[in-house]
Image (cartoon, rainbow, N blue to C red):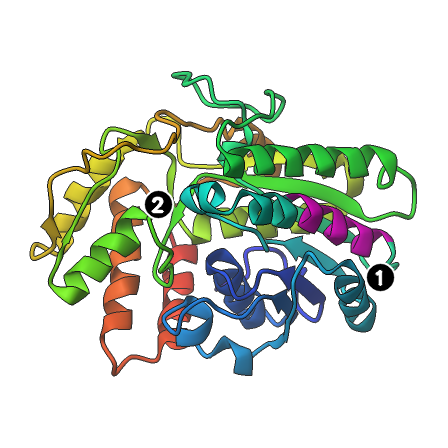
Amino acid sequence: MIDLFSGIYSGKKVLLTGDTGFKGSWMSIWLKEMGADVYGYALPPLTNKDNFVSTKLAAKISHTDGDVRDKNNLEKFFNEVKPDVAFHLAAQPLVIESYNHPHYNFETNLMGTVNFFEAVRNCTSVKAAINVTTDKCYQNNEWLWGYRENDAMGGDDPYSASKGCSELITNSYIKSFFSKENTAHVASGRAGNVIGGGDWAENRIIPDMIRGYENGKGTSVRNPQSVRPWQFVLEPVYGYLKLGEKLLTEGKSYSGGWNFGPAAYENYSVGDVVNEVRKLIPDIKIDAPELKEKLHEAGLLKLDITKAVNQLNWKPKLNFKETIEFTIKGYLQELDAKNNIYDCRVEQIKNYCAK
């Protein structure tokens, strides 16, 4: 049983920006398997190894190539599809890339959000809309406790700053346009460091390790002491879908920001991830940590998920060990040419839901 949402998505038109991305492609598969009509709008996949490509998702959902910076084209897509629900996952998702291309980062993550909400505002079919951001939207004070939804937005690096701004934009649209009757119910989802098969982005620890394993090379570990809220990809996707269900059935009382992260006691560093992966793939080679000057990245980052646990009846299904096991299984399935990767992903969704 993979429908944990009371059948709410079956037969619904669901629009996703960023369906070619990591989380967007996993979410599209889950929605498709629950009987939703899935419509995706995104840039083409970056590589032939991306989850969207390896699962042959283009043949299973309605996808349109498009850039969220193109306001007119995005609004045209909305008005052609006439979705019941819309999820905004299209973004520039990498901290280091935001240093390399700050203008593109801000244009995509700020104006992309504005364009999404303008499209929602001008499409009367939309009942619920969710902006997917990140734990890095918070002003990070390196606190030992987790950030709550009403803590200050911020961010020093361009990526984190852009996501803080995306949250401020969301709040502004809720207060200015979506608080009235007969308007869409709007919320945002903030998740931690999301991992899982199908993510081949540069400068992410597990994709880097798997690439090194595949090529017989070592992997340099950046910031091994940094603590992150590690999550298997289906954990936040479960949260976003649960939030969508509540917006559709309960309305504006579920508007606003929501954190989705691991349990408070699940605190693990980059080094812990490396050690857990090596238990599953002993042949992985790790080089000495990089000694070159590093770009700023947060050291300690935790989310308080009390609100989602108590009000959405959502909670993480996997502990840290299971999170790494699910993730590595997904990659190893990809490395075996005999596998049908779409079927493998559906199997993981079923196994996840059964937890």
- Give me the residue at 53% from left, 28% from top: 155
- Give me the residue at 34% from left, 61% from top: 197
Q: Is residue 204 visible?
A: yes
Vertical relation: 343 (above or below) 249: below
Identity of the residue furthest to the left in this view? 283
Determine if the magenta segment contains residue 97.
no
State the image coordinates of residue 226 (x, y, percent, origin top left): 29, 30
Q: Secondary structure at mark 2?
A: loop
Q: In the image, what residue type sits under mark 1?
A: Ser
Give how far apart the Cα atoms at labels 1 and 2 are. Answer: 36 Å
State the image coordinates of residue 344 (x, y, percent, origin top left): 35, 72
- Residue behind mark 1: 125
- Residue behind mark 2: 318
Say which label, 1 or 2, has the lower sequence index.
Answer: 1
Badge 2: few (under 14), some or many (20 or more) residues near its Cα, within 10 Å?
A: some
State the image coordinates of residue 285 (x, y, percent, origin top left): 10, 52
